[in-house]
Amino acid sequence: MANALLTIALASVLLAGCDRFPLNHILDQDQANREERDQRRLRRMRAQIEALVGEARCESEADCRYIGLGAKPCGGPWEYLVYSVAQTDSARLAERVAAYNQFEAEMNQKYGYVSDCSLPLEPQVGCVEGRCVDLNRGTVGDGREEASGIAIQVVKGPIHPVEREGEENTAPVADAQIAVQRIDGDLFERATTDLTGHARVEVPEGAYRVAVEECPGAMGLPPEQEVKVRDGFFTELRFACDTGIR
């Protein structure tokens, strides 16, 4: 009898725990923890690559090379790193970069990351004051911008009930209200599109959730998007609001 009462008591505790911590909450938290671990691993891999590149010291342009780094969800690298063969073991660097790119591609698929489909400009390398630089930018490495963030475009459509071949059936949305939330933190920003339907939000490197909260002239809002921002780059996103015209 005592054993039966103990079994019932334990079952009650477990059921109460299930009410307090539902299964979907536990699974969501587990995925968030796995994603954070993977992001930390990716940052460590990048730090190792940057250590290999070092200061990219050179004696002539012949010492300078570049390599594509990262895997955009839409395809291609996020950036190019300029390095010196006089300072860096090219084979070892290529091996590290390949492992980095492969792991990021797996993360893109696993966590559903998205990106624009633009490609970075390939560097024109040169040796300037003893360092390999991108002559297109005049800086070591890929010549990042001083700021980073998200470049957003909002359009609405269809604007005509009949689609015509070769004719754009969307229009830019001015005064659309945009919300940008960092996924792993408290950072929250808002933006409003200009007359051309564009807005730029400066945020540091990280993963963000972007949503259109108001879309003047439209009946339906587009789904939110998750995006990864790289330090020194603006990632482009496009949203299409539904006018309801059919």
Image (spheres, grey):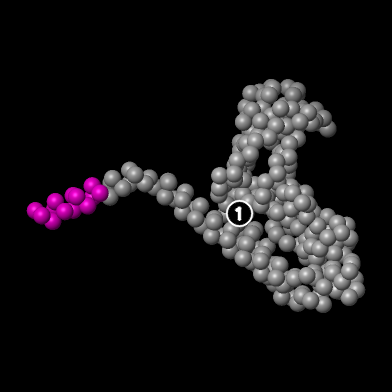
Q: Residue at x 18, y 53 (%)?
A: 7
Q: Specify whether residue 21 is in view.
A: yes
What is the span of residues highlighted in magenta in the rendered image?
Answer: 1-13
Q: From the viewer's perspective, is residue 73 above or below residue 162? A: below
x%, y% of residue 99? 66, 67
Q: Is residue 9 magenta?
A: yes
What secondary structure is found at the residue carrying circle 1? Answer: helix
x%, y% of residue 101? 68, 62
Return the residue nearer the eye: 246 or 69. 69
Q: Residue at x 66, y 64 (%)?
A: 46
Q: Which residue is mark 1?
A: 109
The residue type indicated by label 1 comes to Gln
Q: Residue furthest left?
A: 1
Picture quarter containing residue 197? top right
Task: Give the number of marks.
Answer: 1
Q: Residue at x 13, y 53 (%)?
A: 4
Q: Is residue 228 magenta?
A: no
Q: Residue at x 73, y 32 (%)?
A: 193
* Most common secondary structure along the magenta stretch: helix
Tell me if mark 1 has few (under 14), some (14-19) or many (20+) residues whose alpha carbon lies within 10 angstroms of its own: few
Q: From the viewer's perspective, is residue 67 above or below residue 7? A: below
Query: Is 85 placed left or right of 157 in the picture?
Result: right
